Every structure is written in C-alpha cells, then in structure tokens.
Amino acid sequence: MRVLALDIGQTRVGIAVCDPGMKVASPVCVLPYAEVMAGAKPFKRVLEDWEPELLLSGLPRTLAGEEGPQAQRIRKDAQAISKACGIPVEFTDERLSSKEAKRILREEGLNEKQMRGKVDMVAASVFLQSWLDAR
C-alpha cells in the first residue's frame, strides 16, 4: 500500500511518499497550500503519479501531547483534502519533525536559504518514516 504524507502549513504543503512495501519514506515535493486545497493540477498530478491508498497528515501537538488551534485547522484541512480526492486520511504526531528535517538538510550542507522550500517535504518524510516504523 502506498501512503502519501502531507505536512500542511499555512503557506506550503510538504509531500512525501512511501514505497508499496511500506518500508521507506521519501520526500516528493512542496506545493503551495492554496493549490493543494483547491485540488489544482500540480496536486492532482502528484496523486496520479503516486496513486496513494492513504493520506497521512502530520498533526502538530504541544510538547505535552495536546492538540492546539493549529492542530484543529490542520485536521479540518486534511479532512477536506481527503474528501476532495476520495482517499482516506489518518493523522500522526509531527512534533519535532521540522527540527529533524533541518538537521538532516544541514548535514547535507544546505544553509537556511537553501533549505527554504525543502524542509516541509523532508519533515513529511520524517513523520511518515516514524509512522511506518511503528507499524
């Protein structure tokens, strides 16, 4: 089964995908939030190219593990995306995934400016990999 992970921000959505054997998560791309929410061609192309059977949305929680207003917005957005494309959605804790993504990109020699636009898709692959490993 192929899972498409969404790191939904207010400006961008980072997208990652796993292999059909559900072993390895890989970053795919970053799309503008508005395009994903509108079901624009670039997002439809991602869905057509990868044919996911499940969407996995990162859900930001506080360090205490609670959901705040940001999590409620993301839950609503992810459910709207799920309904629009007819693919079920699950949620997973995305705490510290962006921090881990930045660490990974820094290790690859990227500076802050070069990281911009890449962090979201790497963060999506980080929480997707954690979700896969836990299964």
Image: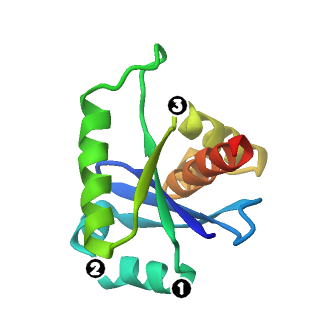
Specify the quadrant of the image occupied by residue 61: top left
Quote the CA–CA distance across marks 3 and 2: 28 Å
In this rendering, the answer to whether 100 lies above or below 35 is: above
Dot 2: element = loop
Residue 2 lies, in percent from the top left, at 61, 70
| Residue ID for mark 2 | 40
Instruction: Locate residue 53, reporting x and y percent.
Output: 51, 71
Which of the labelled discs sits on residue 6, or is there none?
none
Q: Mark 3 points at which residue?
A: 95
For marks 1 and 2, the one nearer the N-term is 2
Which amino acid type is marked by label 1? Asp
Residue drawn 46% across the image and 13% down it:
64
Q: Residue at the spot x=47%, y=79% of the render?
A: 46
Q: Is residue 121 above or below residue 1?
A: above
In the displayed image of the protein, which residue is found farthest to the top? 64
Seen from the viewer's position, the closer of residues 128 and 82 is 82
Q: Residue 49 carries which label?
A: 1
Which quadrant is the N terminus positioned in? bottom right
Q: In the rendered view, tell whether residue 46 sits above or below residue 93.
A: below
Mark 3 or mark 2, earlier in chain: 2
Q: How crowded is mark 1: few (under 14 residues within 10 Å), some or many (20 or more)?
A: few
Give 27 or 105, whichever is nearer the viewer.
27
Left or right of 44 in this view: 30: right
